[in-house]
Every structure is written in C-alpha cells, then in structure tokens.
Amino acid sequence: MKSWKSLRIIVLTMLAMSLLSSTASASTPYDSYTINSQGNDIRSIAGFVYEESITGLDLESGAFERPESLHITSDGDIYIADAGKNRIVHLDSKHQYVRTIGDTEGPGKLGEPKGIYVKEDGTIYVADTANGRIVIFNKDGQFEKEFLKPVSPLIGSTFSYSPSKIILDKRDYMYVVSDGNTQGLIQLDPNGQFKGFYGANHVGFSWSRVLLRLLATESQQAKQVTLRPAEFSNLDIDDEGFMYTTTLGEAANQLKRLSPVGVDTLNIGIEREYGDFYSSGPFSMPSFIGISVDKTGIITALDLQTSKVFQYDKLGNFLFAFGGLGEQRGLFTTPADLAQTSNGDIYVVDRGRNSIEVFRKTPFAQLVQQASTLHVEGRYEEAETMWQEVIRQNSNYEMAYQAIGKALYKAERYKEAMGYFELASARHDYSLAFKEYRKEFIKEHFTIIAILVVILFVALRIFIPRLLRWVSRKVKEKSQVGVAHHGKEGETI
C-alpha cells in the first residue's frame, strides 16, 4: 500500500512537471548546460531562471551599497550584510522592508560587515569585518554583546583578525572565516573563547620541492617562498553538523564537506575539479566564494572567476550551471555570495550591481533534484521512473542513463544495465554489470556449456590423439613409398 502511494506521488509529480516543462525552456541570457563524462559542456534545459532584482531603491531602506553577504531563514526572511552602508537590512519573504540593524550610534554600530547568520530563535550574529569582531543582536535587533579578537598562544599577538563569514552549529559554537587566515576556520565557543583551528587546508606533497630543498644552497633556501595552505572563503552547515566550505587558490577539491572532526568527506581519496576550467593567462582556476547546502545535501556554489553558479548532488556529481559575466539580467558583474530558500530558489549577491539577484527553480530542476536525491540514497528503482522522464525532456542528460543503469543492475537486469552504462560512458559500472551478466549467462546455459565441455574433453582425450596417430602413420607410409620409389630409379640407371 505504501509503495503504491509512493508510486502515485511520483507519477503525479512527473505529470505536473511535464505540463510545466515549457517554462524551463524560457530564454535566458546565459547557457544552461550539464557536463558529460569527457568533461564537455552539453546544452540542457535551464535549471534556474532569472526572476527579479532587489536593489532597495523602492524600499524604505534605500539603495544597497556594496552588499557582501546574505542569510535566508527557514521562513523566508532575508538578512543582507550591506557593507557600504555599515548595516544589516532585514526583508520579509515577500521582499518587503522590515528593519535596519546596526546603523545607529552605540556599541552595536557596524563597520563594513561581510557576514551574517541568524539562528532559529531570531538571534543575529554579524561578522563585523572593519571593527574586527563578532557582534550579536537579539531577535528585536538590539545589541547584546560582542566578541573581539580571540586570545590564544595558537593565534599570537601579530595575527590579523578580520572576520568575514560566520556560522553556528547546534551547540552554538561559532565557525569564523577570517580574511587572509590560512590556518583553518576559527572555532569559538558560545562565550567567544578560542577552541582551535578547524578543518585546515593542506599544501600538497611535491617531489620537486623536496629535491629543490635538498639541492639548494643555504642562500637559495632563504630566498624560497614558504608555501601556505589555501584560505577558506565561505561556509555553510547542514542538519547533521557537516561543514561545507569553499577554498580560494586550489586547482582541485575547492568544495569540501568537513566532518565534526574536520575531515573532508566529499572528496575521499580523489582529486575532483569543480566549476569551469579554462585558459586565460594566470586565471585558469575557479575562485569559489559562496556555498549553500539544502536539506537533501544538494550543494550550490558561486564562482567569482566565471560569475557562474554551479550545483552538485550530495556525492559531488554535477547537476546544473547558470549565470555568467555581463550586464543583462540573469548575469552578474561582481558576485559576492549566495543563499537559497527552503523551496530551492537561489538568491545571489551582486556587489558590482548593488543588488540581490533572484532565480527561480524550474520544474526540470525539481525533477532532477528529486531523482538525484533518491539515487544518492540508493533508492534506484524509485528514481528510475523520474530519470526516464529526465531523458524524455533532455536526452543529453548523461547522469540519468547511469542512474537508470544502476536501477537495472539492482534489479538484476544486467544486460539492459550494460546498455545504459554504455550510453553514460560509465566504464566501471559497465564492467561490473558485464561480470554479473557473464555469470548469469553461464548459469542459464550450464547444460549446453557442460555438454560442449564434455565433447571438447572427449575430442581432446580420444579423437584428436587418434587423428594425430592416423596422420602420423599416413605421413610415415608416404615417406616410405617415396624412399622405395627413389631406390628403384637408382637401379634402372
């Protein structure tokens, strides 16, 4: 009964999305695409379409000036860190002005805030960047307290404390990104006491650096630049307490999912490239500066270098990309951060345009995300119907073929699974399906194979030896006849 109800919901969802799919094809100033197994861009139905721009011009707050960050609560309220005007602007879920926080004289007056986080109870935490502190306001927007630069031998007196992003876990521990800090996220307890550096990036091992140190003279070694780990640029947290981070200056694994002990669980044992790579002088790597994760683990990240938004599933598989550099609506001039609503719409801070750009999720993206979530959870058979609809709408969506192949593999339909894995260029999965299909083939045709083996055995043990002896005897007889004939000719001469 339960499975029938689930199937009915899936079918109704697909019908609704099919009826609304035309909206996903709306013209956009950017290319919507997915990436195939060869790393090539393949045109796709748009996953997100531009809806509107929020500039503050028509609000009581007035125009924004250099907005840096935003936070969207579970009920849809929006808090914007408007750095240029030293304030936090609060809007409701309908984008109407509610209040301004931190712009009045007193201990709560902000200085170019770059980060904002709001707890479920309404308490507001601000990364007050220019003032080098974390400021806490109550749910009414009244100043409560501040946490200045933490004191610890691990930090030292010369440490430059410039908090730019902040987030809290369920224990109310604060995790702070400090501009220029390469030692990891700064972890503070609820009282603002320093608890350590969390999840630091590492400098990769290089044999060339080892050889250079061994061969270089003391003066040459003194002139060498000390390599430091890349610094974090932004962060988010999921319901399980895993921290999602973006890192600047790395060619791989720029997005991470850190466990409570700071271990990357997104890129286990692999080097994965996120975003677009291209050749343009020294700028050939993405520079991710924003990240958001939803309740299903889908990751959305913002790249400053290309001004694009990239979306991945919980395993890091590419789903969608949109945006780009430009003046048209739907493009960005200088993107700074992003966040998303509970229904998956994406809000991007465009510092250069002094606006918040709003993108609505299309029915096609809804379909892919639901199918992907079932796929990640290992519910391949439930996801198969949705993936078939994805292919019906977009036959180039390669991930759908692989997902269907896994559903067929789980259903022990190995030959069919091989076909889908081949379409998805999923060599490893194809190999696994082929091995199982080979076992199945042998099992189904065991009697015939056994008879053939017996025949072959008998042939090898009886008939072939006899044949060889017969051939040998014939050759020998022919040889003797030839010798005898040659002898007679000699007598005649």
Image (spheres, helix red, strand yellow):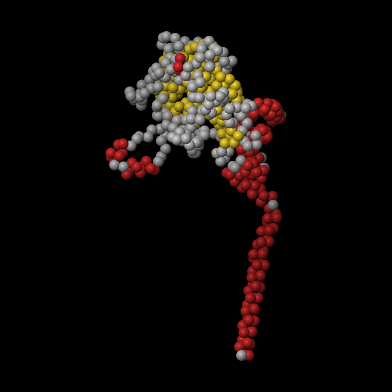
Along the viewing direction, whichever of 367 and 348 lies nearer the viewer: 348
Going by the picture, which residue comes out furthest to the front?
327
Residue 198 seen by the camera? no
The residue lying at 67 percent from left, 43 percent from top is 416
- Residue 405 image offset from top left, x and y in percent: 64, 40
- Residue 409 image offset from top left, x and y in percent: 64, 41
Going by the picture, which residue comes out furthest to the top?
105
The residue lying at 59 percent from left, 31 percent from top is 32
> Taking 358 as reference, is 227 above or below it?
below
- Residue 483 image offset from top left, x and y in percent: 61, 83
> Taking 404 as reference, is 475 above or below it?
below
Going by the picture, which residue comes out furthest to the left?
219
> Taking 479 as reference, is 130 above or below it?
above
Along the viewing direction, whichever of 395 and 448 lies nearer the viewer: 395
Quadrant for the C terminus in the image: bottom right
The residue lying at 61 percent from left, 38 percent from top is 398
Q: To which quarter of the image does residue 426 belong?
A: top right
**Count of numbered labels shown in the rendering:** 0
Residue 467 seen by the camera? yes
- Residue 356 image offset from top left, x and y in percent: 53, 20
Quadrant for the N terminus in the image: top right
- Left or right, residue 124 beside residue 329: left
Along the viewing direction, whichever of 340 and 145 lies nearer the viewer: 340
- Left or right, residue 344 beside residue 152: right
The residue lying at 58 percent from left, 27 percent from top is 29
Q: To which quarter of the image does residue 154 belong?
A: top left
